[in-house]
Image: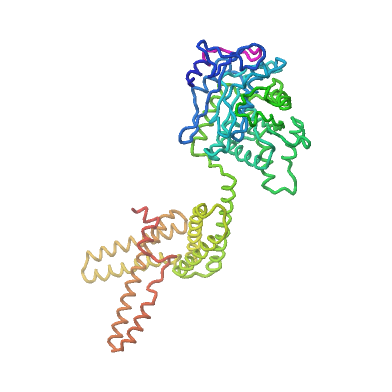
Amino acid sequence: MSDNDLRDNVSSNGSTNGSNGDYEFVNDSDVSSSGNGSNGSNGGGNGGRYAGAPIQVVTVSADRKFELDLEALSAILLRDSIRDKPVVVVSIAGDFRKGKSFMLNFFLRYLQSGCGTTSDWLGPTETPLKGFSWRGGSERDTTGILMWSEPFLIRLDNGQEVAIVLMDTQGAFDSEYTVRDSATVFALSTMTSSIQVFNLMHNLQEDNLQVLEIFTEYGRLALEATDEKPFQKLVFLIRDWSFPYEHPYGLTGGQGLLEKKLAIKENQPTQLQRVRRHIRSCFSDINCFLMPHPGGKVATNPRFDGRVSDIDSEFIDYLKTFVPLMLDPKNVVVKEIGGRQVTGKQLMEYFKVYINVFAGETMPEPKSMLEATAEANNLTAVAAVKDGYVSSMEELCGGEKPFINPKTLELRHNELRQEAMNMFDKIPKMGGKEFSESYREQLVMELDQAFEHFDAQNKSKNMFNIFGTPMVLLVGCVVLFIVSRFCEILGLSPIANLAFITGTLDLGLLIAYLFFRYSGNYPDVIQFIDFYSEIIWRFVMDFFFKIMQSAVENRIQGTGGNRTATNTTSTRSSGLTPTTSFSTHPLSSESIRRSPSNKKLR
């Protein structure tokens, strides 16, 4: 039967009455032409007829994206019988192939019997277990999130009528899905359920608590900030508990185990204390129930079909205790968000909002334990190496150190950076070389950023930074006025006028520069004037240097000096520094291109 056929069947069933057990069960293997299913699977013992089937409401696409089936979900939550009624959402989550759907079908039997109104709600012992799809073996059987198509209406002790919705989730941590996939399913089911059953095998172990921390934190991030605890009831269901002599089966033994596992001790590592505080801060109510092993036939018989007669009696006894603890009208928890009860219609809207959050780009990628540890390990190495580099640079050009030549500073930076990279490569790091490559690139970027800071700090110590630009502007102004006057005497009026106008503009620029520098306004204008003043300064100084160099060479050649003297003098003269820059780095076409002011001009 297709999903559309299921939805059509659901729509045609009409309303149900959860208080009297009058249901019709429809299973894809039992459907007849009249739409009436076999009642052999009901287990109700009351001769009632049952309706419903599992319908997938959250699907997994081929590229492993989770999508909401709005038509399927609306067929369940927007029907007239529950759309305006508060809902109780019971969900089971946990590792794959650990019997979640198997257990959920006993929930289904209890509800189909009218919440235990019959003395034996498990029904005939030879009736196969049907409802949510389940089977033995090692391969997964559930993907995404499924809901039972027929909510169950019950009346609470205060007279309020509510609808119980059963929800099944795909198992976490199999070979086909990532940590993000598992976290998304668990978080989504926890956010939308009022009772979350965390199905575990054998024991409540530390790794279970750490996984729960990751998954619940992923769900908490998707919610808006609130002072209230984000989730409601959490029940650890420990299957195949093997130590009843330490903690007896059932709720009492489970609570004893839970208190022991969640206890915060003074000598505990900080990480373990944080995990326990986090779990307690996320749920309003936390319980634990210990279940015995269901027996050899359940675990090893490939033909086991859920018959009660094949299950150990001890398991059945505790099953009869556990299921009412979850679903009896005295024990159910109505779904609340922000302190207000949620109706079927409202739950539909929350599903749409939450699935959009997880489908977007705002949620971070949850890390596996190894990834998180390797990330912390690599970040620690980056921080340690960077600290060593910064200490060396502080000794070279720190706050009280004098100004040093920019070329010398850059040369020393390159040496220290190479030493830092060698040190990073030698530090043992988790995750391997490929994992560490991105952190190596991050280290290079951070070292270069640190150098820019030291470079600027060194530049601020150069006195030319303060007087360089005003001196260039003032000298230029004086020279232009002198040229203007000289040309006027020679009768070169056009050139004299041009020099006078240029000198006047230069004087105005000098006045504006001093004013902006003093007032602190228009820093971009100050940077622009500084940049091009330096270009003029270097051009003039290079011009005079070439003249001086040419004059020295001509003088040596005129005195008839020998070749050795000429070579020696030439070598010495080539070692002269041609300019004294008031910049922290040599001016070049690359530095001009990268200048912020030059970018604005372009």
Residue 257: in sight, yes or no? yes
Q: In this rendering, would 410 be left or right of 39?
A: left
148 vs 512, nearest the viewer: 148
Q: Is residue 414 left or right of residue 296?
A: left
Q: Which residues are magenta?
A: 10-21
Above or below, comparing residue 549 to residue 313 in the picture: below
Q: Identify the residue at image location x=38%, y=65%.
A: 587
355 or 478, which is in the foreground? 355
Q: Position of residue 261 (x, y in %)?
A: 72, 40
Q: Is residue 517 above or below residue 546?
A: above
Q: Which quadrant holds residue 14?
A: top right
Asked whether 407 or 481 is in front, the reply is: 407
Residue 19 lies in the magenta-colored region: yes
On the image, the x and y values in percent for residue 488 come to: 24, 68
Q: Is residue 89 magenta?
A: no
Q: Quadrant of residue 36?
A: top right
